[in-house]
Image (cartoon, rainbow, N blue to C red):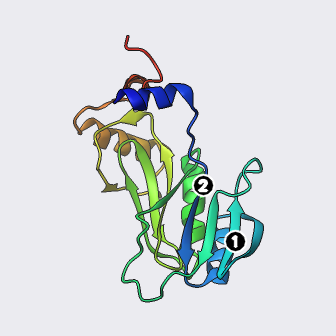
Amino acid sequence: MTQASQLLNQQTSLVFSHMGFYVCDLERMARFYTEVMCFTETDRGDLGAVQLVFLSRDPTEHHQVVLASGRPADLSFSVINQISFRVPDLASLRAMRDKVAAEPDVSELLCATHGNAVSIYFRDPEGNRIEVFMDTPWYCEQPLRESIDLDQPDSTVMARAEAIARSRPNFQSREQWRAQMAVRMAYASPP
């Protein structure tokens, strides 16, 4: 890490807040993110020729996502790699999987583990990939994605995720990895 980066970490609290992306059909996307992803519309309006819808799932944040009109309809793919959301447990992950599986505007639903997380992936109505995930207590090198059956009992799902994580280089507990990252990012001193 450069000296300037260390100084930035020590002097400021740079925290990610929100993102915005262009959409083709503003109303369709606003419906999806409010009804399926459970965001609340906090504001809406025009900024010149661009129509904006502000969405949040956190009452302390005016917006976490901004939908903006103006995405060209002829794009051959979404320029957004993925938008990710954390859930606290497998029950919540399964509930979200079941909810999006019933949604006709969702495509490419799959369940996977990265060893350090158990996830579902799917595409929103305009093809943007969404991940909903639950952290596991482990770290292993990434990238890694293997299918996992969320219809199995929690203990089976977690045992499979752990076995996959253990098979990868640099397997360790999430706490060990976090301590290393804190030093690397200059939030903590080396031991």
**Relative horizontal placement of residue 188, taking residue 3 as reference (left or right):** right
Q: Amino acid at mark 1?
A: Val
To which residue does mark 1 refer? 53
**Relative horizontal placement of residue 66, taking residue 90 as reference (left or right):** right
Residue 77, image quadrant = bottom left
Of the numbered discs 2 and 1, the one sitting upstream in the chain is 2
Q: Secondary structure at mark 2?
A: loop
The answer to which of 24 and 123 lies nearer the viewer is: 24
Q: Please give the name of the residue rendered at 36% of the width and 83% of the height, measured from the top-left corner.
A: 76
Residue 136, image quadrant = top left
Q: Position of residue 174 (x, y in %)?
A: 42, 31
Relative to 127, is 166 above or below? Answer: above
- Can residue 41 be seen in this snapshot? yes
Q: Position of residue 41 (x, y in %)?
A: 75, 67
Quadrant location, the C terminus? top left
**Spatial CA span between label 2 and label 1:** 13 Å
